[in-house]
Amino acid sequence: MRFKFPTLILAPAIMAAAALTIQPALAETTTLKVPFEFSVGNKILPAGPYMVERDPHGSFLRLQNPDLSQTFTWLAVPSGIKTGRVVLRFEAAGQKHILQSVQYGVMQTPDLEKRMKNSKAVIEEISAQ
């Protein structure tokens, strides 16, 4: 059996190049600690750590608690706020906190709760640097 010298050199080079170009599409995840109970839609969630995840294509944002018993996924749109931070925005009305939006870098959910007209909302942010 005869091997040609160029074949012996090119085959490993091609295999190495192929291995370097194959990259798995991994989601980006950040954990934020929310210091108060809050609502998402009609669900009340306790204070504690929550994971915010952006899918590899940036089209969806997910909020979930560590034991994965509560998971919320929203379509993300480009944000007017250009930041590399992960931010949860809440509307505070007395002791109640309502999740308004989730931002992961330049992607953000639309307003999750429609704000009532003439309400005096206090916006609180929980963010990771």
Image (cartoon, helix red, strand yellow):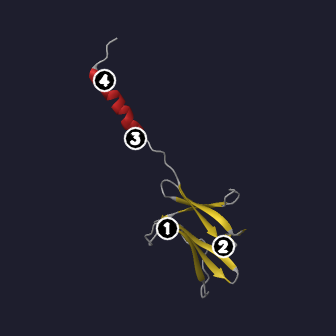
Q: Residue at x 68, y 67 (%)?
A: 48
Q: Name the residue under label 1.
A: 85
Looking at numbered disc 3 in the image, what kind of residue is underneath it?
Answer: Leu
Which is more toward the observer, 91 or 20? 20
Distance between the alpha carbons at the discs numbered 3 and 2: 42 Å
Q: How far apart are marks 4 and 3 (CA)?
A: 20 Å
Badge 1 element: loop
Sequence-wise, the earlier of marks 4 and 3 is 4
91 relative to 54, above or below: below
Q: Mark 2 is on which residue type?
A: Pro
- Secondary structure found at label 2: loop
The first of marks 1 and 4 along the sequence is 4
Relative placement, left or right, of 1 versus 42 is: left
Task: Give the SS element for disc 4.
Answer: helix
Q: Which of marks 3 and 2 is nearer the N terminus?
A: 3
Please give the residue where the numbered disc 4 appears in the rendered image.
Answer: 7
- Mark 3 surroundings within 10 Å by alpha-carbon count, few (fewer than 14), some (14 through 19), many (20 or more): few
Residue beneath label 2, please?
35
Q: Name the residue under label 3.
A: 20
**Point 31% across, 28% down: residue:** 10
Q: What residue lies at 50% left-to-right and 58% top-to-bottom?
A: 59
Disc 2 or 1, which lies upstream in sequence? 2
Q: In this view, does 20 lie to the left or right of 60?
A: left
| Proximity of marks 3 and 2: CB atoms separated by less than 8 Å | no
Question: Which three-letter amino acid code belongs to the residue tagged 4?
Answer: Thr
Q: How far is mark 1 from mark 3, CA to CA?
A: 29 Å
Where residue 55 appears, x then y in whole percent? 52, 55
Determine contact: label 1, label 4, CB under 8 Å: no
Label 2 – label 4 distance at C-alpha: 62 Å
Q: Where is residue 102 in the image (x, y as percent from the top left)?
A: 56, 68
Which of the 4 quarters of the picture holds residue 41? bottom right
Give the mark nearer the N terminus: 1 vs 3.
3
